[in-house]
């Protein structure tokens, strides 16, 4: 069972948690949960609210659930669960049931999906979404490195409504 804590009680390094360890993005759609491993994101204050922004390509199965839904979660796991992130990052929800394959135990808290194995979960209400515009990328080497196939990320910004540990 997860416990809710105040965001102000947390001490963590978002650079290592997001960029080095990775996390799962989860969004429910039509009774089914889409989940994917991610390693890009931002945290901060926007419009006077604590927010996270994640980036997802339209080719990803989770994209449709994020775009259609109002809520999503970001789940962070202890290092001994790195295999879960590897599994969810190398399989598509279009072809398999990632929940079953990963061995994760899902728990619903209101409109949010959390996992018993996660040591930290941000439950977010979507505030903003937008397709990234290649024309506005100033460092053009980024275009060649990340967007050769033109599958440009969308950004999804959500207000952190709850934090579970």
Image (tube, grey):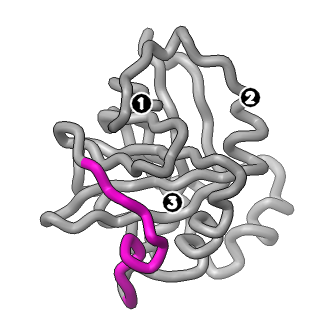
Query: Which numbered tag is attached to residue 56?
Result: 3
Residue 135 in sight here: no
Query: Horizontally, is 97 left or right of 132 in the view?
Result: left
Q: Residues within 10 Å of mark 1 (few under 14, many from 20)?
A: many
Q: How many marks?
A: 3
- Where residue 124 appears, as percent x and y from the top left, is 36, 35
Query: Horizontally, is 85 left or right of 74 in the view?
Result: right
Identify which residue is drawn at 53% across, 17% down: 45
Identify which residue is drawn at 78% across, 50% down: 20
Identify which residue is drawn at 78% across, 47% down: 138
Q: Name the residue under label 1.
A: 164
Please state the extent of the stretch shown in magenta in the rendering: 95-107
Is residue 133 placed above or below 121 in the rendered structure? below
Label 2 or label 1, whichever comes before in sequence order: 2
Query: Which numbered tag is attached to residue 13?
Result: 2
Residue 33 in sight here: yes
Q: How crowded is mark 2: few (under 14 residues within 10 Å), some or many (20 or more)?
A: few
């Amino acid at each position: 069972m997860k416990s809710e804590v105040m965001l102000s009680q947390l001490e963590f390094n978002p650079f290592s948690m997001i960029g080095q360890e990775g996390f799962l993005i989860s969004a429910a759609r039509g009774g089914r949960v889409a989940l994917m491993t991610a390693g890009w994101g931002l945290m901060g204050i926007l419009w006077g609210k604590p927010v996270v922004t994640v980036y997802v390509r339209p080719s990803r199965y989770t994209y449709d659930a994020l775009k259609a839904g109002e809520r999503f979660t970001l789940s962070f796991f202890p290092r001994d669960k790195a295999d879960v992130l590897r599994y969810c990052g190398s399989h598509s929800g279009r072809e398999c049931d990632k929940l079953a394959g990963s061995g994760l135990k899902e728990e619903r808290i209101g409109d949010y999906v959390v996992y018993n194995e996660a040591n930290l979960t941000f439950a977010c209400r979507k505030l903003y979404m937008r397709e990234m515009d290649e024309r506005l990328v100033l460092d053009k080497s980024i275009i060649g490195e990340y967007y050769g196939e033109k599958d440009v990320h969308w950004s999804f910004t959500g207000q952190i409504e709850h934090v579970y540990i």
